[in-house]
Image: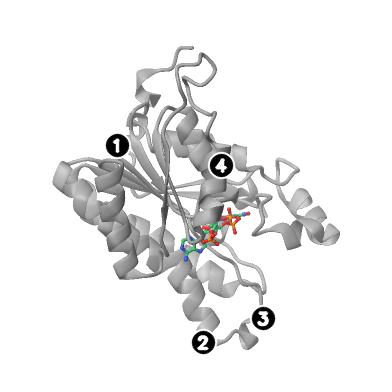
Amino acid sequence: MTTHPLFDIAGRTALVTGSSRGIGHAFARGLVEAGCTVVLNGRDPQALEKAAAELGGVGPGAASGAGAAEVHTAAFDVTDGPAVAAGIADVEERVGPLDILVNNAGMQNRAPLLEFTDDAWRQILDTNLTSAFLVGREAARRMTARGHGKIVNICSLQSEVVRPGIAPYAATKGALKMLTKGMCADWGRYGIQVNGLGPGYIETELTRPLVEDEEFSAWVRGRTPAGRWGRTEDLIGALLYLASPAADFVSGQVLYVDGGMTSVL
Ligand code: NAP
């Protein structure tokens, strides 16, 4: 198999937050397939062990019997500052210096804005936005000292547009887009590229209620130029690109992978 060297990230070490399932797990698989050592994160250690086992036989050497890539787990809550500091220190000591960070952990809470509680507001902000600040800052403190690193923040098409019932989620994802640009502004001089990846409607546990709602599902298909829901595999190529030397002069951008949805009325 030949790959252009600009896209070669074999041997890099990557942490993907929120990778026990869904999009994060697909990102982890893609990075393992590209030859990276990958650290899975989430709050549930058992779910992480299961997710790691699923990636056990994956990796460039797996088919030839040369051995699969390394997969590690690190259970910590990305909204808890001290836990994040301890978690990143532990990962770097146990696994090695991080080359790639994917801030993917996130949640949704669909409810009319008039009924949204203070606690629910703080929880979604903590999970979708503060987490990227906490984990990003902690990883970047080490990456800046080493003079290189790639950070990819998982935004959303709701970084740009919104619909009724998801205003708090859209507020977090819009802010994450600007945090991405701010990280780019502050850390670019240290050789760190920070970009966003904005998925469209992708079938995962987070969107299961929408997928199962036939009327909504039909709306998504009709509204998307590609005419279908996205699959987690649709997002992998964009992540690998943003994590690779091919994107060494790309920073502060959000790459939307949405079947064209953000481009049409
Ligand atoms: P998901 O299936 O619900 O998975 C969320 C992951 O985040 C799980 O591994 C969960 O594990 C982890 N997590 C949640 N809170 C955490 C915390 N406080 N600390 C550590 N880990 C935490 O979600 P998904 O659909 O894959 O979404 C992943 C990302 O893509 C999110 O940022 C989401 O906003 C974004 N996105 C999704 C879509 C879509 O259509 N699905 C579209 C655009 C953007 P534990 O619960 O075990 O901690």
Q: Tag 1 or tag 2, which sits nearer the N-term?
A: 2
From the image, state whether disc 4 or disc 1 is nearer to you: 4
Residues at marks 2 and 1, CA–CA distance in whole angstroms = 40 Å
From the image, state whether disc 3 or disc 2 is nearer to you: 2
Which numbered marker is on residue 7?
none
Q: Secondary structure at mark 2?
A: helix
Q: Secondary structure at mark 1?
A: loop
* Percent position of residue 39, x then y: 41, 44
Which numbered marker is on residue 26?
4
The colour scheme is one colour
Which numbered marker is on residue 118?
2
Position of 33 relative to 208 (above/below): above
Type of amino acid at the residue the image marks with label 4: Ala
Relative to residue 201, is residue 50 drawn left or right? left
CB of mark 4 near ligand 1 (< 8 Å) = yes
Q: Secondary structure at mark 3?
A: loop
Q: Residues within 10 Å of mark 2 (few under 14, many from 20)?
A: few
Residues at marks 4 and 1, CA–CA distance in whole angstroms = 26 Å
Residue at 27 percent of width and 40 percent of height: 96
* Percent position of residue 92, x then y: 26, 47
Nearest the eye: 4 or 145:
145
